[in-house]
Image: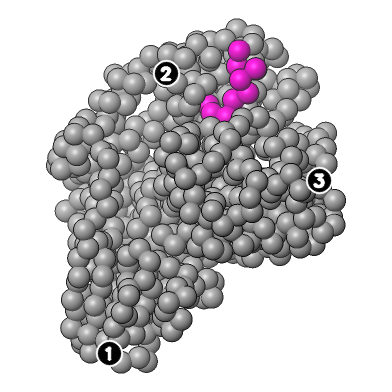
Amino acid sequence: MLYIWDAEGAPQQPIGRLVLWRSYGEDSCPEAISIPQWIEENADSLRARYLAWVYELGQVKVQGRRLVDFLDIRPGFSYWWMAPIAEKCNFSKSPHITDAVRLMALGDWAAGTSFSEIVLVSENRSLSKCLASWASHKGCKFRWKKIPPKRTQHSLSKNIFKWLPNPVQGILSLTRYLFQRWPLKGAGLSEWLGAKGEMTFISYLFNLDPVGLAEGRYKSSYWAHLPDKLSEDGQAVNWLHLYVIDKNLPSARFAGAAIRSFNGKSENGQVHATLDSFLGLGVVLHVILDWLRLCLKWPGVRGLLSSTPLGECDVSPLFEQEWRASFLGTTAVLSTLYHNMIEAAINSLPVRQRCGVYLQENQGWESSLLQIWGVTGNASLIGVPHSTVRYWDLRYFFDPRSYSRKLTNELPMPYRVACNGDAAIGAYKRGGYPVHELVKVEALRYLYLAEAKPRSVQTHGFMTSGLRVLVMGDYLHSNTHLQMRLLEKAFPLLPIGTRIIVKPHPNCPINPEDYPELSMELVEGSLGELLAECDVAYSSATTSAAVDAYCMLKPVVSVLDPYGLNLSPLRGCAGAFFASTPDELASKLVSATKLPVHSSIRNEFFSLDPQLPRWKTLLCN
């Protein structure tokens, strides 16, 4: 019997062959098969096969046409590239991708193994449906031992919304968005319509410098001092921002005031607007029409996933809700809204653009931007992966066949991908990206590392004053909570006098009352200064801040998230430490400070010339 354990801890009395679905191993079950560990040991094959499945899904014929062609809702625009299943955001928008990869791993392990029954212990109904289908394919029995789901604190309105039909959810989501963002309508619009610049940057209105914001100057950690350099060189630049709520700009009203302030104090033709500046009745009408086009296509694609298995397994139950929402619900409405706002913004530029630059995370709106930019006659559009390119962040990787672009409606790609160092270029190359379309530029977000003084490359060992642990929070609450809960359990095992210094992510506050057994100090300030004062850094499973610490020659211990894939940017890096249990975390936080640290790799990771010669060459050319 195959006994699949998808629950906390491990079973007290394992029955049959034990398979741990979301654990890297338990001391009480040394003979168990760990699916997360199997994935790490066979990562290249599993990632390639999942990407191939997504690609081949887009090639499936629907009413005589490829799916990617069937979903063209405008001339030259296929909605396929905005759909979540093509976006592949496996850590926040589509976490169920993890179970799809695990099902592949289970199938690989079970090949050639015989068993008469499969028992699943889990709260996951969708997973039980997939395994029931797989068991039928294998000719064996299946039982689901359902465990009570974790209680989640949702408001009454959210619970009601969850059970509404998808079209109603879509209408309510559109109404809510318009209500929240309507104050931004027209902000910077007159300046945009009169813009003389031939260069446009598309970025997030987020991570702004508070001092610059108070003075009415645009300064973002995404772009460092590049905007100042462009202004000094007399380059007129149009800035199109995607507003993201944070503590500096808590509402659209504050964001609108910031845009007006930026424009009032800008020099040399710098113009600022937001996507929401282009809201209007015409845009809303086009959104409704595009949404209706998607609704009409739903009957043709409804059963497509169940007829396209991933290996031996039907994974359609994992994607069922997402797939439906992509055509009928909130995802469809908001995706088409972004498309129409981008279309209004680019079409209203009075001057043909010789260059465009956007933050590249391969989100759905970027595919819309790439398709619109091309059909409106503008020149080179450059994608900028502003942080690290992580191995298991599937947004950055595609099946190599996607890059051929021999047919219509193929993968939208920028003219160049501006990589911030050799590490990013290497990741793209290993993923099969066309090498001639990669270019190296300075790592704007990490330029402070050029002047930061790393600790000595000697065996360190913490001082008698006590171990100083810097906790670097994640922007996802679930990741941060997992990180803090593991530290809370490990805290009693740490040396007496240990100081826990916590720097939350700006978009994810940490409440010490949620972790009563953990003595902590909440801090703000620059990451570089805080790293200089700590002995060891402790990061979540996904945050790119782990690389900051690594490049500062600080020992870094990262969470191994049993619920997801290994999304650490330090995966595979020499001298990086990972922990999945409290004992393991306590041990590695201490031992990491006593080992000789790795040599400096900051120049291998990033290009760090503050004079930005590579950026100047790229933008001038």
Residue wearing tag 2: 252
The answer for how far apart the CA atoms under marks 2 and 1 are is: 58 Å
For marks 3 and 2, give the one nearer the viewer: 3
Eye-nearest disc, 3 or 1: 3
Task: Measuring from the top left, give residue 5's x and y in whole percent.
Answer: 32, 72
- Label located before the other in sequence (2 or 1): 1
Would you call the spot at circle 1 few (<14 residues within 10 Å), some (14-19), or many (20 or more)? Answer: some
The amino acid type, in three-letter code, at marker 3 is: Pro
Rendered position, 180 above or below 147: above
Q: Which image quadrant: the C terminus?
A: top right
Label 3 neighbour load within 10 Å: few <14, some 14-19, many 20+: some
How far across and how far down the image is residue 66, in percent? 33, 60
Question: Spatial distance from mark 3 to mark 2, Cα to Cα?
Answer: 40 Å
Q: Disc 3 or 1, which lies upstream in sequence? A: 1
> Image point 79% across, 51% down: which residue?
603
Q: Secondary structure at mark 2?
A: helix
C-beta proximity under 8 Å, tags 2 and 1: no
The disc label shown at residue 454, or none = 3
Q: Which residue is mark 1?
A: 115
Residue at image position (48%, 26%) is 246
Q: At 42% across and 13% down in the image, what residue appears? A: 253
Q: Nearer the viewer, residue 63 or 53?
A: 53
Any part of residue 133 in sight: no
| Residue located 57% across and 33% down the image | 522
Q: Given the image, on which type of amino acid does mark 1 rest? A: Phe
Q: Which class describes the residues within 10 Å of circle 2: few (<14), some (14-19), or many (20+)?
A: many
